Amino acid sequence: MALAPPHSTLCFFVFFLMLLCSSIAQTQRNISLGSSITAVSNTLPWESPSGDFAFGFQQIGKDGFLLAIWFNKIPERTIVWSANRDDLVQEGSTVELTKFGLVLKDPKGNQKWTSDISGTGVAYGAMLDTGNLVLANQNFSNLWQSFNEPTDTLLPTQTLEKGTMLVARYSETNYSRGRYYFMLQSNGNLQLFTRNFPLDTTNFAYWSSNTADSGFELIYNQSGFVYLDAANGTVLNMLSSKATSTQDFYQRAVLEYDGVFRQFVYPKSNGQSSKGWNMAWTPSSDSIPSNICMKITEDTGGGACGFNSYCILGNDQRPNCYCPNGYTFIDSNDEMKGCKQIFEAQSCDEDSGDTDHFDFYSMENADWPLSDYEHYQTVSEDWCRKACLGDCFCAVAIFRNGDCWKKRTPLSNGRIDYSVGGKALIKIRTENSTSNSGGADSKKKDQTTLVIVGSVLLSSSAFLNVLLLLAACLVLRRFRQKAKVIKPDRSIPGMNLQIFTYAELEKATNGFKELLGNGAFGTVFKGVLALDDRKSCVAVKKLEHMVKEGEHEFKAEVTTIGRTNHKNLVQLIGFCNEGQHRLLIYEFMSNGSLAHFLFGPSRTHWLQRVQIALGVARGLFYLHEECSTQIIHCDIKPQNILLDDSYTARISDFGLAKILKTDQTRTTTGIRGTKGYVAPEWFRNMPVTVKVDVYSYGILLLELIFCRKNFEAESEDETQMILADWAYDCYAGGKLEFLVENDEEAMAEMKRVEKFVMVALWCVQEDPSLRPTMKKVMLMLEGTVEVSVPPDPTSFISSL
Ligand SMILES: *[C@@H]1O[C@H](CO)[C@@H](O)[C@H](O)[C@H]1NC(C)=O
Ligand SMILES: *[C@@H]1O[C@H](CO)[C@@H](O)[C@H](O)[C@H]1NC(C)=O
Ligand SMILES: *[C@@H]1O[C@H](CO)[C@@H](O)[C@H](O)[C@H]1NC(C)=O
Ligand SMILES: *[C@@H]1O[C@H](CO)[C@@H](O)[C@H](O)[C@H]1NC(C)=O
Ligand SMILES: *[C@@H]1O[C@H](CO)[C@@H](O)[C@H](O)[C@H]1NC(C)=O
Ligand SMILES: *[C@@H]1O[C@H](CO)[C@@H](O)[C@H](O)[C@H]1NC(C)=O
């Protein structure tokens, strides 16, 4: 790390002071003594000269008003500072600028807050464009500034001095002082602490800069860097992994309610693609600490998610809190508050026979460090189970390589930790185990249930569809009346994949009753699961023809699939890997497959087909080039493209080729060597690359353009049997109109039809190296890249 010469830092500091002074002097909107704002719904705030920031009252739901500073030009009105976070004031309260400073009074005139200056002498105030609210005297020198009394946020040009701290808010919507501190100690050490809630004392330091005796101040400088420096200006700890321009982006660094310190940026101009606050540090795991679930392991206190819960870091790097089976959130609006048992505790009276009413639910890799009260070594799992079962104090047993730990409630610091392995045996009451406590909650959820009724995934007649629809409705009604909502509570760290038991899926699908389709990979059933506190339809795929590679391979592939996330892919929600059973759980696609859409009874629109073609191309491009592990689909065909509520194309069954014995000839239309969706290299001794998908996509594209199957045996004219050949002949002969003569919408866009046909013909070239990449396909379809004249796709074959 380069050391900044002390004098340059000093210069900068002086310059910075000058900047600050001049900006006060230039502020054309002095707030004069006697000015006041009243807390009513449409109250006007005091704005900074540019309008970027404003100071005034923000209404917090129905709870009252917060005297605050916020980003004023963005729709979110993100609050960066507040005066009365622990004590909201009622409508009609006022804030006034007096010579003693700002004074906040409730409607009865009682003082609720005041900016703390010693003595008098305030001449004016100013809301600056940096987000700093200053009160100054006659001589323009600052007597008070909001930057010196931060709440949970730092802004560019703001510093955190020794002995000051940020206090996280309680929850996303509750601004009062919450559970975490970010503190620059007076010895110069910068630390993150859990708070001994509700007291103000600190409990456990879960991150430290280790700069006792050298740290001086935490700086968020004009270039967007957040760092801790020494008194001589040396950077001791650079918190930012990179800086983002403060010219082009609004920025803030905030200790969030989950205990993580993060920096966010928001594009100022409208032209930017991703509006809204985005994490500034890349990878976003640079947030401090990078994994809060693992980082908080405290002797007293519940951990990142509270007592009896466990924590898993989500895709978005936020901790997600879950309750183990047999437990439920104490407060479903405050998941960090922990979980409670929903069954009656085990009787300690040996004669009661209560032991018989308990059993274990096992969770791989789950752990609650520090809650154990007994530890046995070189024992068997069976011994461990029995020991815990017969012990009324034992709530959970952890078994790992012959070690058995007994744990009592409240369990703390829960997490899924792959580095330790082993399993947790959660003791639950088997009978009478669901008390009424969950009842009120699930009722509330029932009302918000979205009933999604859809048609089948695979092509079938309209009549069958109607029947299945009716069945779906009936099943859904039965579910709503009777079945208990299954709340999956396990998932894989780093992604939103959930692990389900076979029993849960059996229940969710009502015993695998409603068949959605039968494919090369297995059978698909419809089910209903509670996801994100809402009942949602899902497609449950029972895998058959598994490659005998064992569990590891399956988990690895599922993890790869789970890491993908694109709007043109069917999202994998979770899986089950239990004994013989291998199941995958996907989002339910209400508009069935593309095969049904294209070749079914109803009429399709050209522009709709164009959108689908673009969507599939984008999804494939993502699989080939954009996701962390390249995925070759190997089986692109209309049956594997599904359509969601808005008829957006979503690719399904990707990533399965590796774990399943796919009989690729299955996917041809029955005639080997003719143009199925299968690239010719499958039949020759040639390596299989992403270009096999490009080939299949080309065939699919032709089908989309002409709304016709790639092979029609009943064709009167033999030259029209194979769509790709026919299309090339028509294209080469300049007679493409002939192919779309019945489609007025396409006829009106012959230029685009021709371009799409040309792209498709490039895709179906026999020679894989002639085929474009999916990226190029996408750019050509979108019109960004010109399409050249394609050669005869079969020229390669004839030259062999
Ligand atoms: C702001 O108020 C101070 C004190 O009254 C005054 O000296 C200064 O000129 C004012 N500045 C502007 C720009 O009005
Ligand atoms: C302002 O500056 C003058 C002269 O520099 C000094 O006499 C006076 O006390 C200062 N006023 C305040 C309020 O600091
Ligand atoms: C915010 O959380 C605190 C701490 O639990 C609680 O006392 C307070 O009532 C909450 N405030 C609101 C507005 O919900
Ligand atoms: C600045 O201070 C730090 C910490 O006190 C020290 O390690 C470093 O050597 C100093 N650098 C210079 C150039 O004085
Ligand atoms: C902010 O800090 C970084 C890192 O120390 C430095 O490179 C940059 O010049 C600083 N920017 C300003 C405006 O001081
Ligand atoms: C379940 O609870 C009810 C009422 O508390 C009791 O009568 C019944 O015997 C219990 N059943 C079992 C199997 O424990």
Image (tube, rainbow, N blue to C red):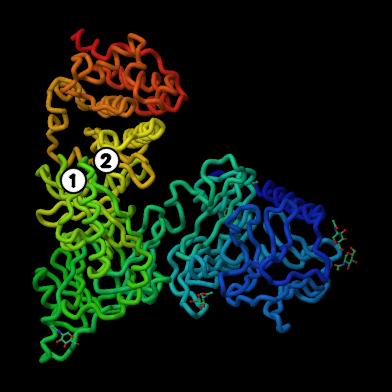
Q: Residues within 10 Å of mark 1 (few under 14, many from 20)?
A: some
Query: Is residue 382 positioned above or below 160 on the image?
Result: below
Q: Are marks 1 and 2 in contact (CB under 8 Å)?
A: yes
Indicate the quadrant where residue 766 lies.
top left
Closer to the camera in the image, 337 or 60:
60
The answer to whether 544 appears left or right of 92 in the picture is: left
For the question of whether residue 291 can be seen, the reply is: yes
Which sits in the foreground, 235 or 253?
253
Q: Amino acid at mark 1?
A: Gly
Image disc number at residue 517? 1
Give amino acid for label 2. Answer: Ser
Label 2 CB, ligand 3: below 8 Å?
no
Q: How far across and how far down the image is residue 115, in percent? A: 71, 73
Residue pointed to by mark 2? 593
Which numbered disc covers residue 185? none
Place of residue 524 in the rendered image (x, y in percent of width and height, measured from the top left)? 18, 48
Q: Circle 2 sits in a helix, a strand or a loop, which is it?
A: loop
Q: How far from the left and from the top, in percent, is residue 492?
A: 28, 56
Q: Which quadrant holds residue 500?
A: bottom left
